[in-house]
């Protein structure tokens, strides 16, 4: 087993039980953790942007990155009952305030367009996309915390295992590179291995984990889910590599000592979580 794989297994051994407990608790605990990661991820985006000479509006950005998950729970089933109407007004107010800060503090030569764009994008990406996890965890169709917890883990497990299968398939088979400019180690064989692994794993997870809990999803829908999540996760991984390549860095940060930053650890999940919420809603599960 490679040193990289050993580190991944060690992180999983600690992180998965902790994640299981936090997802089970849900509510403000889960929303608060997502807010923390949202701020940390936005900060990493801002550092990447600053390497290219862009000065983001960090404080409004941090407010937005933290607010999106909190608003996500506030409007979710089981939350305090904030209407979607008011949540959208708050988001629009934040956007207007962010531009107002740019008007007050920046000159045309300070690249205000890039500053506002990076500020808003980072908050939406690092704080807004993971907030869809709360849509799954607090779905009104789920009758217990255990049901909700294990449904949340469906896309997480498919992503984590599919990532490992992609690494293993790429190392074992080799062949043409998937995106040599962005990620020289990734191959088409690895990408296909990960996608096929997701297509097999998702229905197995449904049969072994979800069905005994009373969550029934057609096997062919889970095959589609596994394929979509695996492919989406790999594209998310490449997207983060693109950002880092522009900034000329290997890791986005040091939030997780020895394992890089928040963007490095959650690169696939930023794309996987909203995709999973959309698919599960389409399938009528949430």
Image: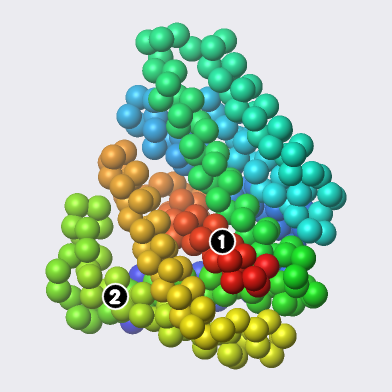
In the rendered image, which quarter is residue 130 located in? bottom right
Name the foreground residue: 223 vs 6.
Answer: 223
230 versus 220 height, above or below: above
Residue 49: percent from left, percent from top: 39, 33
Q: Residue at x 25, y 65 (%)?
A: 186
Say which of marks 2 and 1 sits in front.
Answer: 1
Disc 1, SS: helix
Residue 177: percent from left, percent from top: 18, 65
Look at the image and name its color scheme: rainbow
Viewed as shown, does residue 69 lie left or right of 259?
right
Name the foreground residue: 55 vs 145.
Answer: 145
Q: Residue at x 66, y 34 (%)?
A: 91
Mark 2 and mark 1: span between their CA atoms?
A: 23 Å
The residue indicated by pointer 1 is: 278
Q: Quadrant of the N terminus?
A: bottom left
Give the numbered dot on residue 192.
2
Q: Is residue 31 visible?
A: yes
Mark 2 and mark 1 lie on one chain; the one further toward the N terminus is 2
């Amino acid at each position: 087993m490679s040193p990289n794989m050993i580190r991944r297994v060690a992180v999983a051994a600690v992180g998965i039980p902790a994640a299981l407990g936090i997802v089970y608790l849900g509510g403000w605990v889960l929303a608060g953790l997502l807010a923390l990661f949202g701020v940390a991820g936005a900060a990493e985006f801002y550092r990447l942007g600053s390497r290219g000479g862009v000065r983001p509006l960090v404080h409004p950005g941090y407010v937005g990155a933290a607010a999106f998950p909190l608003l996500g729970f506030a409007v979710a089933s089981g939350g305090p009952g904030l209407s979607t109407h008011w949540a959208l007004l708050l988001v629009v107010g934040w956007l207007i305030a962010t531009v107002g800060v740019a008007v007050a503090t920046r000159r045309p030569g300070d690249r205000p367009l890039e500053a506002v764009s990076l500020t808003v994008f980072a908050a939406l990406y690092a704080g807004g996309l993971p907030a869809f996890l709360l849509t799954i965890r607090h779905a009104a169709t789920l009758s217990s915390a255990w049901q909700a917890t294990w449904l949340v883990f469906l896309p997480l497990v498919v992503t984590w295992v599919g990532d490992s299968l992609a690494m293993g398939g790429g190392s074992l088979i080799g062949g043409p590179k998937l995106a040599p400019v962005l990620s020289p180690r990734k191959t088409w064989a690895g990408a296909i291995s990960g996608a096929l692994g997701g297509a097999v794993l998702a229905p197995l997870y449904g049969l072994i984990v979800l069905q005994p809990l009373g969550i029934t999803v057609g096997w062919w829908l889970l095959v589609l889910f596994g394929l979509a999540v695996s492919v989406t996760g790999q594209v998310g991984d490449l997207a983060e590599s693109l950002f880092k390549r522009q900034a000329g860095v290997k890791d986005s940060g040091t939030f997780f000592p020895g394992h890089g930053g928040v963007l490095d650890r959650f690169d696939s999940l930023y794309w996987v979580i909203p995709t999973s919420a959309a698919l599960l809603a389409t399938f009528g599960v949430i």
